[in-house]
Amino acid sequence: MSAATRLSRDAGIRVPLLCGAMYPCSNPELVAAVSEAGGMGILQPISLTYVHGYGFREGIRKIRSLTSRPIGMNALIETSSRTYRKRMEEWIDVALEEGIRFFVTSLGKPDWVVRAVEPVGGRVYHDVTERKWALKGVEAGVHGLIAVNRRAGGHPGERTPEALLEELADLGLPVVCAGGVGTEEEFVAALRMGYDGVQMGTRFIATPECRASTPYKEAILQAGEEDILWTERITGTPVAVIATPYTRAMGEKVGPLARRLLRHPRTKHWMRSWYGLRSLWKLKRSSLDESGSKEYWQAGKSVAGVQAIEPAGDIVRRFEGAAAERESPEGRGRRDSEGA
């Protein structure tokens, strides 16, 4: 295993580690800190503008004032709204003008993003939860896949990290593990498994650079794997959150009428838009609220390995050191003696 992977080459980074885009937690200071340490922070446009109050170009330049190293951009490309699609096209154009060359796409068909960024050397990695979505990404011309497994925060997939990699490995693209990595050992294990890198979110919430509330960060420190539950009550599809009295009372399933509307071809886009707007407001309020009164906090099963609030750069450097140590003659010798 080498710390240099197809992801690190595509992204122009030293450590094959992404700080995944998180609404509302992807503030400029966090994105910059991960990139400055040798990984890559992925900015989230709605977080940057709606939550943290920057004009989009202004926000990118704020990040650039904190690091000169590569940063990425998340493009949610759901096409239910023409207005939103136009805004995302504008954001991508601005990002390219400001020198961003790495894009992570989520939802929708990313072919138009590939066409927009490839002429200037851009790379597109697409979020997938199973093979059928990966095949659509391959057809669209993406350059890599973000494999979102069942251990992820936010909207998780249904596959284990091992099963998902097995589904995707023969497609010839770099595959990034998203979900369940919170420690150096888990990072190294993902690379040894055959992943080209790791995308982490939960681990980077518990950092001083992240603007998430103190109660949110403390909840991550205190939670174990068994404290993560999936609820459909916020976005209409399963979201991984920390189990609290509030989330348990909220329930895990949408009602039968909402389920029918979410599945019907004529109403599903309207329902997704309605849930999306509602979730923007709820997540912004709950994640940044220092009172902790709503206790609605997204997180993945990697909470089990998060024991302290640490600077983001220290986390990246520690993970880099673990990968390098594993590749040293001494590390290989220990693996051989342990039967690894």
Image (tube, rainbow, N blue to C red):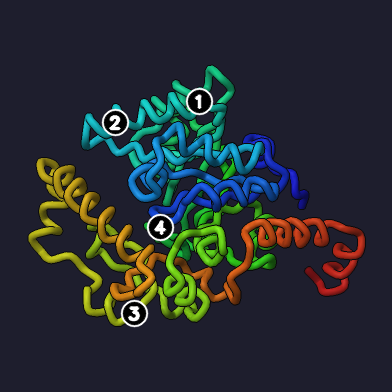
Label 1 environment density (alpha carbons within 10 Å; few <14, some 14–19, many ≥20):
some
Helix, strand or loop at disc 1? helix
Q: Residue furthest top?
A: 119
Determine whether 239 is above or below 80 in the image: below
Q: Nearer the viewer, residue 286 or 298?
A: 286
Residue plotted at (55% across, 48% down): 31
- Disc 2 versus disc 4: distance between alpha carbons? 25 Å
Q: Is residue 262 left or right of residue 94?
A: left
Q: Which mark is residue 157?
A: 4
According to the picture, the residue beneath numbered tag 3 turns out to be 244
Q: Position of residue 192 (x, y in %)?
A: 70, 57
Amino acid identity at mark 2: Arg
Q: Which residue is mark 1?
A: 96
Q: Residue at x 36, y 50 (%)?
A: 51
- Where does the image place residue 301, in percent across and percent down from the top left? 48, 70
Asked if residue 249 lies left or right of residue 106, the reply is: left
Task: Say whether marks 4 and 3 touch (CB < 8 Å).
Answer: no
Mark 4, Cα crowd under 10 Å, few <14 / some 14-19 / many 20+, is many
Residue in the image at 78% along x and 68% along y: 340
Residue 28 at x, y percent in the picture: 51, 47
Mark 4 secondary-structure assignment? loop
The tag on residue 209 is: none
Q: CA distance from mark 1 to mark 2?
A: 17 Å
Look at the picture and state if 107 lies above or below 151. Answer: above
Q: Nearer the viewer, mark 4 or mark 1?
A: 1
Residue 185 is situated, as x and y percent measured from the top left of the image, at 69, 67
Q: Amino acid at mark 1?
A: Leu
Task: Report, in whole angstroms, how far the alpha carbon at label 3 lies from the one at label 2.
Answer: 35 Å
Quarter of the image for residue 112 reads: top left
Q: Which mark is residue 85?
A: 2
- Asked if disc 1 and disc 2 are in contact, CB closer than 8 Å, the reply is no
